[in-house]
């Protein structure tokens, strides 16, 4: 549980900067994702293929989730190396690694989509096996095929731990968003306003999840000790 405690400590200490990074990166990407996903859903509704539209929407959301993890992973690295947590650092890391993560996310969702077409379980297995690829890109600086290969190794070795983390945070986020959705619908019928409120809530949950997963990734890869050495050598 130490990775979660460390994540919560970082979250509390730098909450305002986390919100600022979310406003700059997370929410704009969420809004763009909402627009694109709704386009596909409505398009396939017209041709009476609504389930396919929802599949496309889900895959687009997975691309979004891959991208928004980048700046918050960098925040953990700043904290581990005893750097001052800044907004500029995470944004710079996003600009530097965004394209590589985006390209890998397209391969990622293609494999998930293919697995889902074969049967839903293979799609879920693929999503867990390769989930850590943004962390591989940002933390280990591995890209392309080597990044996917490394993510697969991490997913294979820690499959059930990754699945458990995703399940716990997924359930918590789902329950919170259901409550927010119910409360929002009591106040307004505007789809965009309700969606905006949900985006804001999820933008507050994502960083805690990413901080936690980053700490576990560092621990599993043995890099936690390397970053601690960097910290101690700075004194």
Image: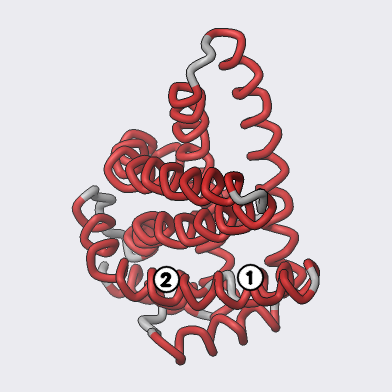
Residue, x 67% and y 29% (percent of image)?
A: 178
Residue pushed farthest front?
Answer: 47
Q: Is residue 79 left or right of residue 113?
A: left
* Residue 43 image offset from top left, x and y in percent: 52, 49
Whichever of callouts 2 and 1 sits on the residue coming sooner in the sequence is 1
Q: Is residue 179 left or right of residue 5?
A: right
Q: Is residue 112 left or right of residue 159?
A: left
Reply above or below: 37 against 197. Answer: below
Reply above or below: 104 against 32. Answer: below
> Viewer-proximal residue, 88 or 119?
119
- Which quarter of the figure is the N terminus placed in? bottom right
Disc 2 from disc 1: Cα separation = 39 Å
* Residue 195 image offset from top left, x and y in percent: 49, 30
Label 1: element kind: helix
- Give the label, 2 or 1, closer to the camera: 1
- Which quarter of the figure is the C terminus placed in? bottom left
> Viewer-proximal residue, 177 or 222?
177
Q: Indicate the quadrant where residue 68 lies.
A: bottom left
Numbered mark located on residue 113 in the image: 1
Label 2: element kind: helix
Count of numbered circles on the image: 2
Residue, x 56% and y 60% (percent of image)?
A: 59
Reply above or below: 103 against 13. Answer: below
Numbered mark located on residue 228 in the image: 2
Residue, x 30% and y 71% (percent of image)?
A: 99
Numbered mark located on residue 219 in the image: none
């Amino acid at each position: 549980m130490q990775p979660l405690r460390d994540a919560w400590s970082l979250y509390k200490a730098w909450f305002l900067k986390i919100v600022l990074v979310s406003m700059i990166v997370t929410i704009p990407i969420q809004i763009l994702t909402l627009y694109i996903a709704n386009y596909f859903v409505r398009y396939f509704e017209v041709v009476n293929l609504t389930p396919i539209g929802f599949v496309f929407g889900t895959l687009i959301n997975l691309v979004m989730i891959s991208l928004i993890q980048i700046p918050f992973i960098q925040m953990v690295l700043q904290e581990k190396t005893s750097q001052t947590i800044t907004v500029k650092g995470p944004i710079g890391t996003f600009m530097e690694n965004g394209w590589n993560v985006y390209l890998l996310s397209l391969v990622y969702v293609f494999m998930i989509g293919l697995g889902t077409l074969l049967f839903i379980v293979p799609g879920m297995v693929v999503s867990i096996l390769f989930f850590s690829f943004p962390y591989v890109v940002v933390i280990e600086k591995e890209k392309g095929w080597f990044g996917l290969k490394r993510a697969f190794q991490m997913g294979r070795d820690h499959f059930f731990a990754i699945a458990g983390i995703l399940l716990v945070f997924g359930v918590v986020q789902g329950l919170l968003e259901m409550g927010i959705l119910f409360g929002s619908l009591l106040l307004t019928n505007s789809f965009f306003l309700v969606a905006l409120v949900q985006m804001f809530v999820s933008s507050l949950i994502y960083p805690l999840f990413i901080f936690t997963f980053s700490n576990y990734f560092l621990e599993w890869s043995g890099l936690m000790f390397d970053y601690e050495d960097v910290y101690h050598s700075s004194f």
